[in-house]
Amino acid sequence: MNYIRKQYDTLKARIEEPRRFLQVLAGPRQVGKSTLVGQVLQDTSLPHSMEVADAVDPKDSDWIRRVWESARTTMQLRGERERILVIDEVQKLDNWSEVVKREWDEDTRRQINLKVVLLGSSRLLIKKGLTESLAGRFELIRLGHWSYQEMHDAFGFSLDEYIYFGGYPGAAPMIGDEKRWRKYIKDALVAPAIGKDVLMTSNIYKPVLMKQLFELGCSYSAEILSLTKLLGQLQDSGNVTTLASYLEILDQSAMLTGLQKFANDEARKRGSVPKYQVYNNALLTAYRGRTFEMDRTDARLWGRWVESAVGAHLLAMAEEADYQVYYWREVDSSKKTQEVDFVLVNNGEVTAIEVKSGRRTMNSGLPVFVEMFHPKKSFVVGSGGISLEDFLSADIKVLFE
């Protein structure tokens, strides 16, 4: 598979222009960061070095200086005028941003034309390092989970296959053997993401609780459930405050989030019951032990899978398109629950989205929400509205133009 994602053109153009900024390619595990960089390096005539910090001792931050100096020395020995240095999983090293700042500034002072690309899978640590030490020195390129359109173009996924199997390119060839596919998702994707990106780079005092929260939270994707009720289903003891902090870390790792309820009052948002949402539907279905065909013929379940796929699509583009994702639910005076599946907020402008799969009944929440909040846009995705395939193929940024 040699599918080229849209970020290829951006990265290639930037490394071929005069040295100005560090290029930072950030995204969750197994979305193709290393593959994308490899494609760019293969198609450029510039000499390059690629180093991976995955197996390096986290305390050995001097490793960055050593590989940087090796690249400089190679340039000198070969008489090169410029070179590209790629460092993968840089955020796993202690004080990485301070070392990068020192070496980058040294090259700038000495006019050494070493162009540097950093790759990282922990959004929390990458963001922290960039803002604390590297302000004004970098450009960020985000690489998110694969969309339906990408999985369709690269692997021939049908819409239903994308809804169930999600958007991990490495797992795509295995969907014909669902047992093998599930094992790959759990062992090759989730285990290292939790074990390395989460537990090793965050202050997690209850790792068993974190793993249980992840698996149980994923099973509730597209559902609203209080942390107190969720806590009652977990085997490891903890408290609501701990769960909330762990859920935030999972969100920063682009695995699982708890959407806040939309409200004009910020305190009501923060105190709301979360709506769980996976970043990739594979994280929802891989742990269930049911087959694709079983779930596809279960109207109630499939309706939730569709809603979760829409939510994952919205989350994948939220940071790049600069909008926040919420849900909305209220109980009216007649004790009837009114709900809107997703509410997007971009620069104060509100968009309300209701998902209807054809196997899921429509509630009356959307017109009630429109009357209360007067959103700029409101629409249905699915039966009676924008087709699900069109919506999952679209760039969400067009909604805000």
Image (spheres, rainbow, N blue to C red):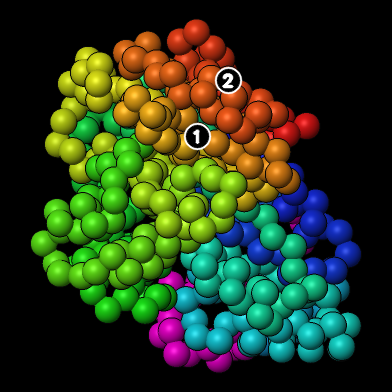
**Mark 2 crowdedness (10 Å alpha carbons): few <14, some 14-19, many ≥20:** some
Instruction: Please give the range of residues in magenta.
Output: 44-67
Residue 273: in sight, yes or no? Answer: yes
Residue 149 spot, x, y in % from top left: 54, 27
Front in this rendered view, residue 312 or 266: 266
Q: Assign a secondary structure to mark 2.
A: strand
Which residue is at a point 29% across and 22% down the rendered structure image?
302
**Which residue position holds label 2?**
379
Which residue is at a point 71% across and 77% down the rendered structure image?
134
Q: Indicate the amino acid at tag 2.
A: Phe
Residue 198 spot, x, y in % from top left: 37, 68
Quick check: 14 above or below 128? above
Is 395 magenta? The answer is no
**Image side of residue 117 versus residue 233, left or right:** right
Q: Which mark is residue 342?
A: 1
Front in this rendered view, residue 10 or 115: 10
Residue 316: in sight, yes or no? Answer: no
Q: Assign a secondary structure to mark 1.
A: strand
Which residue is at a point 29% across and 46% down the rendered structure image?
225
User: CB under 8 Å between callouts 1 and 2?
Assistant: no
Front in this rendered view, residue 47 or 210: 210
Residue 123 spot, x, y in % from top left: 53, 63
- Which callout, 1 or 2, points at the residue further toward the start of the chain? 1
Within the image, what quadrant is residue 239 found in? bottom left
Quick check: 267 above or below 168? below
Q: Which mark is residue 268?
A: none
